[in-house]
Amino acid sequence: MKIIVVSDRGDRSYSFHLTPLSRALMGIFFLLLLSMASLLSYQLWQNSSITVLDSQGSEAWVARLDQQGSDVEALRESAQRDLSALTLQLANLQSRLLRLDALGQRVAKLTKLDSGEFDFSATPAVGGPAAESEQQLDYQPPAFMDLINQMSVEINDREQQLRILEDIISNKQQANERFISGRPIVKGWMSSPYGHRTDPFSGKIAMHHGIDFAGEEGSSVIAVAGGVVTWAGRRSGYGVLVEINHGDGYKTRYAHNAKVLVKVGDIVKKGDAISLMGSTGRSTGPHVHFEVLKNDAKVNPARFVYRASR
């Protein structure tokens, strides 16, 4: 192959003869040049794409961080509101606990309990050996959790004290309720005492196992103590009879009634009207025959009639 090169003005020319080897080398040179240009173009394109992707990723991360910041702020505000509400609740619990302590002291004083036994200003004495399974934990709860736990312990202590106090008061009330005392009438007078007397029907000396209280017919007959009605109806010699079991082996009987106001199984309280005075059975006029029995043995009712109520 022959190559002729002419100058710009055309006054000169040069010629070259290319051998097959020269032509092959030139082809290889041009191929390498083309490959390098292609590689350079690809590299520039790739760098441009990475820059775009990095820019988009940065924007996404910024948006995500902003959202998380907003979420954290909302959570902080919610926690603050909850803490404020919890603080108010603790203050309310503390005020209620103070009123509870005052009430406990007042009740203990009114019921004349030992002041040293129920001191509501102090924690009840407790104790015991430590359990072997107990472990010391490094975790320390927040300060407000300590307050909640302390309040819970104090309230449980007060509940325990009040529960015991309630049982004591209830037992005292029941004992007072069952305490036999007083007369079985609202109005009237004692017409016949307990003991030997002349029988109004036979004229002979006979034992009178009760006390008679005369009054106006139809007036109220009342229970001298709380208990359960075990008889409410006619009985030989007693006429219309009411019998009440007061526990501890004690019973009371109210005889010669005109009308019964209770029935068997009823629970009556001290002072409840149980019947109306009459003259049924072996009687000479309106009155109530009152008896007291201890383990089914008749005893003198006088010591119960004249003793003071608790």
Image: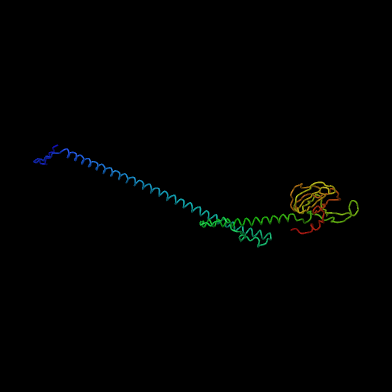
Q: Quadrant of residue 93?
A: bottom right
In this view, the residue farthest toward the front is 21
Q: Nearer the viewer, residue 30 or 274?
A: 30
- Position of 154 with respect to 232 (left or right) is left
- Position of 40 with respect to 192 (left or right) is left
Residue 188 x/y as whole percent: 81, 54
Residue 186 x/y as whole percent: 78, 54
Q: Quadrant of residue 15?
A: top left
Q: Is residue 146 above or below residue 29?
A: below
Residue 175 x/y as whole percent: 73, 56
The N terminus, quarter of image: top left
In this view, the residue farthest toward the right is 203
Q: Nearer the viewer, residue 308 or 141?
A: 141
The C terminus, quarter of image: bottom right
Residue 172 x/y as whole percent: 71, 56
Q: Is residue 55 above or below residue 121?
A: above
In this view, the residue farthest toward the bottom is 116
